[in-house]
Image (spheres, grey):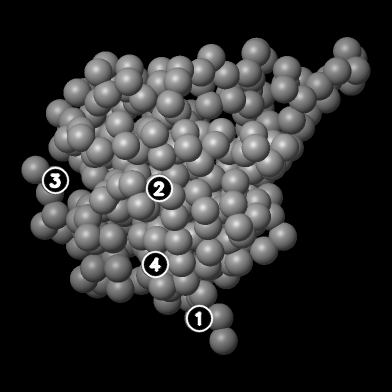
Amino acid sequence: MVNLSNRLSIKIAGIEFSNPVLVASGTFGYGEEYQSLIDLSKLGGIVTKSITLEPREGHPPPRTCESPCGMLNAIGLANVGVEEFIKEKLPFLRSLETRIIVNVAGSTVKEYVEVVKRLNGTEGIDMLEINISCPNVKEGGIAFGSKVKSAYECIKAVRENSSRPIIAKLSPNVTDIVEIADAVQKAGADAVSLINTLVGMAIDVEKRRPVLANITGGLSGPAIKPVALAMVWKVAKEVKVPVIGIGGIMNSQDALEFVLAGASMIQVGTGNFVDPQTSLKIVNGLSEYCKKKEIKKISDLVGKLKAV
C-alpha cells in the first residue's frame, strides 16, 4: 500500500498520494527503465509515456538536443500502443507501491475514447492524464488544447467513457490558458496539469539546417519555469479543480514556488534526465522545509502566495 502517514501526503480527485511529487509523462518511460536508479516506491506517482491506440515509432532522429537552460525534443509520441501497454508494461507498474497515472493521446476524439475504453477493464491505474496538446487531424493538425471547443469536446468524450479521475494536460501554446482550463473543468476534468512544452527550434549554422529532424520541438527545463509558474498562478486563481504544476522544476525550492502559486502537486520532467534522483531529492527537500517551518501538511501551503 502507498504510505500516506506523513506531512507530505495529499489527496486530489479522491486519490491519496504519499507526497505531491510525480514524474512527468515522456521523461520516465514506463517506470521500469528507472527501477535500478531510484526507489520508485518513494515517488508520489508515475505518469507514463503517452499511450495511443496503435503503436507509434515517432519522429525520425535526431529527436532531442540541448538548449540554453533546457532541452528540445520531438519524439512524436513514440509508444507501444494500448494493447501492448496493457499486456507488457502495466503488470510491472501494477506491482509498484506508488500511484500510476496513464497519459493518453490521440489524433481524433474517437481515438482518445477507444484508448480509455480499453483501459477501463484493467487494474492498477489510479488516474488518467489526457494529453490535449496532440494535433487534431480532423482540424488540420491544430492541437486539441489550443481551442476552447476542441479541448472541451475531447475531455467531455473521455469523461463520458471513463469512471477514473481525469487530469487534462494543458498546452502553453495558446492565447489564454485560463479559458482552456475553464473549458476542460466544465467538460468534467477532475484536475488540470500545466504546462506542456513550449514550441521551439534550434539551427546548425554550419549545415544551415534545423538540428531536429522535425524542425521544431518542445522546449522544456528551467528555461520555461517562469512561464509555467505564471500560468499555474493564473489558472489556480480561476478554477475549482486541483492544479498540477509542470515546467523546469529541478529542486525543492522550484517545487515550493509552484505550490505557493497554487499547485497541489508537481511533476518533474527534464530533471529526470539531468539526475535520476531529482524527484526523490525534491521529496526530501519538501519534507525538510515543512519540518523546519513547522508545517503540518504540505496542502496548507497550496496557493498561499502573498501577491497583494
- Specify whether 211 is left or right of 95: right
Q: CA distance from mark 4 to mark 1?
A: 21 Å
- Amino acid, disc 2: Val
Name the residue carrying label 4: 241
Q: CA distance from mark 1 to mark 2?
A: 37 Å
Q: CA distance from mark 2 to mark 4?
A: 17 Å
Q: CA distance from mark 1 to mark 3?
A: 33 Å
Q: CA distance from mark 3 to mark 4?
A: 23 Å
Name the residue carrying label 1: 306
Sequence-wise first label, 1 or 3 = 3
Q: Residues within 10 Å of mark 1 (few under 14, many from 20)?
A: few
Name the residue carrying label 3: 2
Sequence-wise first label, 2 or 3 = 3
Sequence-wise first label, 2 or 4 = 2
- Amino acid, disc 3: Val
- Residue 158's disc number: 2
Q: Secondary structure at mark 3?
A: loop
Q: Residues within 10 Å of mark 2 (few under 14, many from 20)?
A: many
